[in-house]
Image: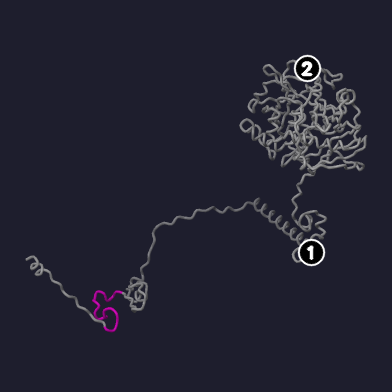
Amino acid sequence: RLFVKMEETVHFVVPTIYSNPTGWGPPETSIPKQFTELPFAPYSKNDRVGRVADFSSTYATKYRPAEETEFHLVDSTKTAKKKGFRTRQPTWRAKKVTARRRTEVANSGQAAKQAYGKYDQQRRRTGAGRGGPPGAAAASAGRGAGGGGRAGGPGAGFRRFDKDKIVKESSVEVKADWEVIDQLDFSVLTKLRYDIPEAVNILQCGSVGYYDKVYDKVTTKTRKVLKRIDKTFFKVTTTDDPIIKHLSLEDEMIRTFDGNIIFGTDAIISALMCSGRSHYSWDIVVRRVGPKLLFFDKRDKSQFDYLTVNETASDPPREDDKEIINTPSKLSHEASYINQNFSQQVLSNTKPHTFSDPNPFQGSLSNEEMASVAYRYRRWDLGDGNMLVCRCEVDAVVAKPGREEFATVKALNEYDSRASGTDDWRQKLDSQRGGVLATELKNNSFKLARWTAQALLAGTEEFKLGWVSRINPKDAFSHQLLGLQTWKPAEFANQINLSEPNMWGVLKHYIDMCMALEAGTYLFLKDPNKRLVRLYQVPEDAFTEQEDEYITYDIVDSDDDDEDLSD
């Protein structure tokens, strides 16, 4: 019954089917009226079907109403302005600087072209370069004259980088009658080694004050003014030392020693030990006496005992500095003056430590007039029948519970915190002392190594290093103590990469060179501009100009006096 009802209510009308025997799709006569205006893109059955209706084709233009062509899309949103810099008109000064720079560039370019033109002409004449005959480049005149790497040498071209090169002067003028015996390159010294010999005290004399421990607490905030000490400092050379004269002539143990005996002072021996770090020129007199005696001496009125400042820095002080107090010679005098005053100021006013023998250089001077320095004469067995006898200095005695220790006291000085390659001590010394020390080690490697070697030779238990700076960079005679540090000499040597076996190996190499010489007078001279030392044979009377018994150093507070050394 249900199927009968549905059959009565549902009707299906069959649509009209149009046949197109001449083509594909319905014929045009069969298109309904409502679709006659719509665009249509006809295509054949062989075409690839891509689209059926194309509103951008010519058919769309043909059938599109005319009013649609007048339609335009309008954007009413506001566009943001581009951000940029406002062009600034150059001032008259900027125009002047720009014009000058253009002129300099043009002149340098013209000079370069001319130089290269001359070089190119010469290269063409000699046949050097590509395509030239073999050996033509080596035969170029410029290579021989300039001594450079490329053909033409540094003179033929515009590559000159040595216009600011500092040419240092020799510490002594080489005479025409001096003969070069040998020379030693510093690259050889780093490989030398010798076992550290044991020191034996021969004699201890003089008196030295006790160290005042209040200076251990000095900082940049509690700095102290460096005082001026009016005392006499003796810098006696080896052959003028009365104790060494007695030991070399009358001492029973030394006279009966079956071998060679070498005499020197801690200042001279330390300079030889650390010579590989030096940059400035220095000289040491060698006196070969008889078959077994050798003396290391210094010249009369030499600058050997003056301290250098920033000698090993990448940008060391220059003699043509606009500030005359910052030239190497003036800074050397200032550093020596600071060390003399500092070594006496840190001592207390208590009764000094006195050895059994008096100061050998006292003469008619009282204890108050002499600087507080004690001397230790020590000897070392260097093997191969060689024995070293050296006079060493002790600067202070440090009182410890139940014992006393000797100390070496030195001071570094800052002359200008704005100098190239230096640190501002007042800003960094308390918080970055290790970095400041590293900078000073780079700038004063030779000086610090010599001080350490002197402490090791003297056998002192402590090495005290003060930090002294100018109160005003324009005043070279007013200073402040900013701090003080203490090390064991052996530990400080390791910290600055100073090897004791290498020190003794270098010294033994110098001694072996001298022991091969005949009796006479010789001179070790460090080349001022090369890393080597030459050994000269000189006349016996080449350096005998001193008439007084001893050389003493006086502190001079005048900027007009170039020499602080008095006879």
Residue 326 picture quarter:
top right
Q: Is residue 141 visible?
A: yes
Helix, strand or loop under label 2: strand
Disc 1 packing (10 Å; few <14; some 14–19; many ≥20): few
Mark 1 residue element? loop
Q: Is residue 331 visible?
A: no
* In-image side of 286 versus 28 (left or right): right
Label for residue 134? 1
In which quadrant of the rendered image does the C terminus lie? top right
What color scheme is it? Answer: one colour
Residue 528 picture location, percent across and down: 81, 42
**Quick check: 488 left or right of 526?**
left
Q: Amino acid at mark 2?
A: Thr
- Dividing the picture into quadrants, the one containing residue 99 is bottom right
Amino acid type, mark 1: Pro
Disc on the earlier residue, 2 or 1: 1
Residue at label 2? 354
Q: Which residues are magenta?
A: 21-38
Q: Is residue 28 magenta?
A: yes
Q: Residue at x 74, y 50 (%)?
A: 161
Q: Say if the magenta span includes residue 437.
A: no
